[in-house]
Image (tube, grey):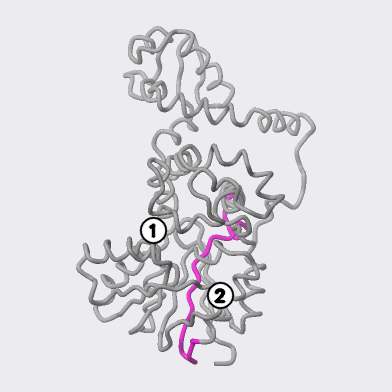
Amino acid sequence: MSNFYTDDKKTALEAVSDAQRIAFAPFTFQATIALQDLGILMAIDQSPQNCLRVEELHQQTGLSHYGIKVLLDAGLSIGLVCLKDELYHLTKTAQFILHDKMTQVNLEFTRDFCYQGLSLLKESVKTGRPMGMSEYGDGDTLYPYLSSLPEPAKSSWFNFDHFYSDKAFSEALPKVFEHKPKLLLDIGGNTGKWAIQCTHYDADVQIRVLDLPIQLAVMREHVATEGMSDRIKGISVDMLDPAQMLPEGADAIWMSQFLDCFAEDEILTILRKTANVMGPDTRLYILELFWDRQMYEAAAYSLNCTSLYFTCFANGSSRMYHSKELLRIVQQAGLTLVEDQDNIGIGHTLLVCKCTSP
């Protein structure tokens, strides 16, 4: 359990400095994007001595001296470059901006999908509706629009979503298949990535992907490309519709980064519906990111910021949960936690549950 946020240990000087960084945070973000996209950081990175003067940057990028200077001045304060003897050097932070996949995925997600709509965060909190969704559609939830998002928002959204789950899938597979499930339900299967990996991992397993119709259409295309259409089938279902029942007889049920897409009362509804079709030996595997289970504060910070994406875009009511909150709902739904494993992939937790009273 993390203790990142239990005390305020900053001095007054540190606190007022942080306050100014918050006040100018949009400037910091846009300056970083400009330094990257205009090639200034990369030019310095690829120079023989890993440092350049303004005149050399002007010659290489074609940008005006003014534009280069104003961005590099900001870069100094942001912590992306250092200046010594009129030579600009990249910092370690800039190296991560340029070369770290996780940082790139997060930056592009914020730039391409979130930035404009986040200006409506306050209205989203007040109304309980994802007001930032007006960028992409007129519904109360993002999910039906995912496959029809404009570029580059679409690619950046899926890259963000898949980057974190993909890292955990390979580590979770041995755990899910240690009991040799023959039929697995993949609830909220999205593009079918997990289902396809399961069929490659186990030659006998049959998969049923449960999702909204528009997501299933994308999933079926991917499954067909992999030649797995005979083993992976789609079932259209709205998990919040009490009239729609889930198929019975599954040995394993999988939910990856699914429950964080719903409000607490909705999660309870989903888990109770799931528990109703679980036999005594059925195992429910919940793969989630919890901000309180992270090894580093930067990870908790990223997850708490991601909660604001859910508020402003996804549905206005879901979030990245504290593990105690979700475990309480698991118990209320009539499920028993039989295994709890942290540090899977990039900070995921795998919860393994069985039905309390099958």
Q: Position of residue 350 (x, y in %)?
A: 50, 69
Name which quarter of the figure residue 290 lies in. Answer: bottom right
The residue type indicated by label 1 comes to Asp
Q: Earlier in the sequence, mark 1 or mark 2?
A: 1
Residue drawn at the location 37% of the way across and 25% of the way down: 42
Badge 2 marks a residue whose secondary structure is helix
Q: Quadrant of the C terminus?
A: bottom right
Q: Which element carries disc 1, helix, strand or loop?
A: helix
Q: Which mark is residue 270?
A: 2
Amino acid type for the residue under numbered disc 2: Ile
Front residue of this view, candidates 280 and 228: 228
- Vertical comparison of 189 with 208: above or below: above
Q: Which residues are magenta?
A: 277-296
Q: Is residue 175 above or below residue 316?
A: below
Question: Do we see residue 280 in this rendering?
Answer: yes
Residue under the image location 30 percent in, 67 percent down:
196
Residue 166's disc is 1
Residue ID at (63%, 72%): 327
Give the number of the mark in front: 1 or 2: 2
Whether residue 288 appears in magenta in the rendering, the answer is yes
